[in-house]
């Protein structure tokens, strides 16, 4: 059974997005050249116009995803009447130095939710531990006993810990397929912070059964549990804006869709046959094990002829996000290295052209801040490269020729660029108010206020995140391996001293940049202030945004009406934390290794 977004629709969406992005980028490029031409075109004008060209293309491409997403609505595929499942699915939960009580409470909640569907016998849970700390590993084993005892999990829940975490998460998953993949038809791959409704899991297995060409089915996870200002802003954006952008992405991707590494189900045979990952030549950060393995695995499945699809109509898929800018930057450092590593893969033989473009897209998403930074630096240096004004360019002509005032073109260019940044989210808000979707987020007034607040907050955070991302790119280019640090869960509040320790270099860069602009190009100071001021006050921004939010701003539907599986997890977690004793009977819950 094929879903909508077939090859013709995907091709049309891609062509529309490409044409719009090229027109917008070309228009910005020419407009800036005309602006520079007014006082004599020089090399720095061409450099700045090139930076504008690439940056505008990237912004326009993102804006088109929102426009395409508002042109249609998510819809399920046409399926035959549901008569039950005939397959078996392994639910994989990779863990790496995580709190087992919290992780296992999610497993217990999903198991209870699956039992409510009547199809739990078709699903097994596999806890795949890559934990390096022996004390945490001991807790994993103890709480595994509790999990088995309370969930009646014998024969359905398994645990194993690898002696070596070679290949990191991708190697962990590969190890499962080598050991036990043949025992299952499908595998639902989660992260340690993933949570899914039983009905959603059953529906995913049903769709995999119905379409024998489907190799991977990706859901759109919603961010939950955020309490800090930064985290709740991201949570609101993921819940309110991301479904529209994901709809546009699904239209473009078609049957060659994405894999985000979690909250997705794969066909075991297809994955095992197609997705063996090579070790790249050379040393990290560009060589060694592939870090951002998910997009590579999606490309390998597509190369082998399997459909890879994003079904954005599926609800009941959740994850948690970082609560502060520093934790976000740490996670982003790993993603940066993984995406830049794809430069060694983009030319691999047999890949679909769209997958190659996706790799380039990922690389561009991390180097694009360097284009904006390059544009700023070139603008500061431009007066030193500008030719001297010649008011008598025509020999023998007695009257001076003054350069034309092209200020309006510079203003128009700035409005256009800011429009590409802000207009898509404002359009999503307007669409939500007219369609009635805003009621689920507390009403039109709260949606409009939250959208404006998110735009303001993201504008303040953007220069700080740009600096973190620029540092990440430079570290990778200079050969620094960032490794795979443990994700920070729970409270992410940062004191001012902690924020200063993480951002002092951003403050110094902002002060020096503003001083250099004042000295070299004082006319640019007002334009630079929206970037320099957030950098200079970065410690205060990072600390303030890490603190708990006390307002209704950024309200999401899951905060008004939590999903049933979230309530189940809350009950398990509260009971286990109140009564942390684990079963002492050695006959209960001996690990069933996989």
Image (spheres, rainbow, N blue to C red):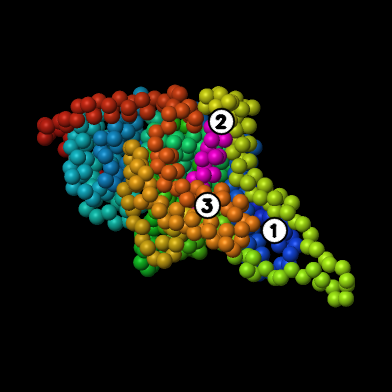
Give the CA distance from mark 3 to mark 1.
Answer: 23 Å
Position of 148 relative to 477 (above/below)? above
Q: Residues within 10 Å of mark 1 (few under 14, many from 20)?
A: many
View extreme (bottom): residue = 395
Q: Residue at x 88, y 71 (%)?
A: 398
Q: Residue at x 63, y 32 (%)?
A: 430
Reading the image, the residue beneath label 2 is 449
Marked residue nearer the N-terminal end (1 or 2): 1
Disc 1 on helix, strand or loop? Answer: helix
Reading the image, the residue beneath label 3 is 532
Q: Main secondary structure of the magenta part?
A: helix
Q: Residues within 10 Å of mark 3 (few under 14, many from 20)?
A: many
Q: Residue at x 50, y 64 (%)?
A: 347
Tell me where the magenta segment starts and ends, as one range.
450-466
Reading the image, the residue beneath label 1 is 32
Residue contact between numbered discs 1 and 2, judged by CB atoms under 8 Å = no
Q: Residue at x 11, y 31 (%)?
A: 585
């Amino acid at each position: 059974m094929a879903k909508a977004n077939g090859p013709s629709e995907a091709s049309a969406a891609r062509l529309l997005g490409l044409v719009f992005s090229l027109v917008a980028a070309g228009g910005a490029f020419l407009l800036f050249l005309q602006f520079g031409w007014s006082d004599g075109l020089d090399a720095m004008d061409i450099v700045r116009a090139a930076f504008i060209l690439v940056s505008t293309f990237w912004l326009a491409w993102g804006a088109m995803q929102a426009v395409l997403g508002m042109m249609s609505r998510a819809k399920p595929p046409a399926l035959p009447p549901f008569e039950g499942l005939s397959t078996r699915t392994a639910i994989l939960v990779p863990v790496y130095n995580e709190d087992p009580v919290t992780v296992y409470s999610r497993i217990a909640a999903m198991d209870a939710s699956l039992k409510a569907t009547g199809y739990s016998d078709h699903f097994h849970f596999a806890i795949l531990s890559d934990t390096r700390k022996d004390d945490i590993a001991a807790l994993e084993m103890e709480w595994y006993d509790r999990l088995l005892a309370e969930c009646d999990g014998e024969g359905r829940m398994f645990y194993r810990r690898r002696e070596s975490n070679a290949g990191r998460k991708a190697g962990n998953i590969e190890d499962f397929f080598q050991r036990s993949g043949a025992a299952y038809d499908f595998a639902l791959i989660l992260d340690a912070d993933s949570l899914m409704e039983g009905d959603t899991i059953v529906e995913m297995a049903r769709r995999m059964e119905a379409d024998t060409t489907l190799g991977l089915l990706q859901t759109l996870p919603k961010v939950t549990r955020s309490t800090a200002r930064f985290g709740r802003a991201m949570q609101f954006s993921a819940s309110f804006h991301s479904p529209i952008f994901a709809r546009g992405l699904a239209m473009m991707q078609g049957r060659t869709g994405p894999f985000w590494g979690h909250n997705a189900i794969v066909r075991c045979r297809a994955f095992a046959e197609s997705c063996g990952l090579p070790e790249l030549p050379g040393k990290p950060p560009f060589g060694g094990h592939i870090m951002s393995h998910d997009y590579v695995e999606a490309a390998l499945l597509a190369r082998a002829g399997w459909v890879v699809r994003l079904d954005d109509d599926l609800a009941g898929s959740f994850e948690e996000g970082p609560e502060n800018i520093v934790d976000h930057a740490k996670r982003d450092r790993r993603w940066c290295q993984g995406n830049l590593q794809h430069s060694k893969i983009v030319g691999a033989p047999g890949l679909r052209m769209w997958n190659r473009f996706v790799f380039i897209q990922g690389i561009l998403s991390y180097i694009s801040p360097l284009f904006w930074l390059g544009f700023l630096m070139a603008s500061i240096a431009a007066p030193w490269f500008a030719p001297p004004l010649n008011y008598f360019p025509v020999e023998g002509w007695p009257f001076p020729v003054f350069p034309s005032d092209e200020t309006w073109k510079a203003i128009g260019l700035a409005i256009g660029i800011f429009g590409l940044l802000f207009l898509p989210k404002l359009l999503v808000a307007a669409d939500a108010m007219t369609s009635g979707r805003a009621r689920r987020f507390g009403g039109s007034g709260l949606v409009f206020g939250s959208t404006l607040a998110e735009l303001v907050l993201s504008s303040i955070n953007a220069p700080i995140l740009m600096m973190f991302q620029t540092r990440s790119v430079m570290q990778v280019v200079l050969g620094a391996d960032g490794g795979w640090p443990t994700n920070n869960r729970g409270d992410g509040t940062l004191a001012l001293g902690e924020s200063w320790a993480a951002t002092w270099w951003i403050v110094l860069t902002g002060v020096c940049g503003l001083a250099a602009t004042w000295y070299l190009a004082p006319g640019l100071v007002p334009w630079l202030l929206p970037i320099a001021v957030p950098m200079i006050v970065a410690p205060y921004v990072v600390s303030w945004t890490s603190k708990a939010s006390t307002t209704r701003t950024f309200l999401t539907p899951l905060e008004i009406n939590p999903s049933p599986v979230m309530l189940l997890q809350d009950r398990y977690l509260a009971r286990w934390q109140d009564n942390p004793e684990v079963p002492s009977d050695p006959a209960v819950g001996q690990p069933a290794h996989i």
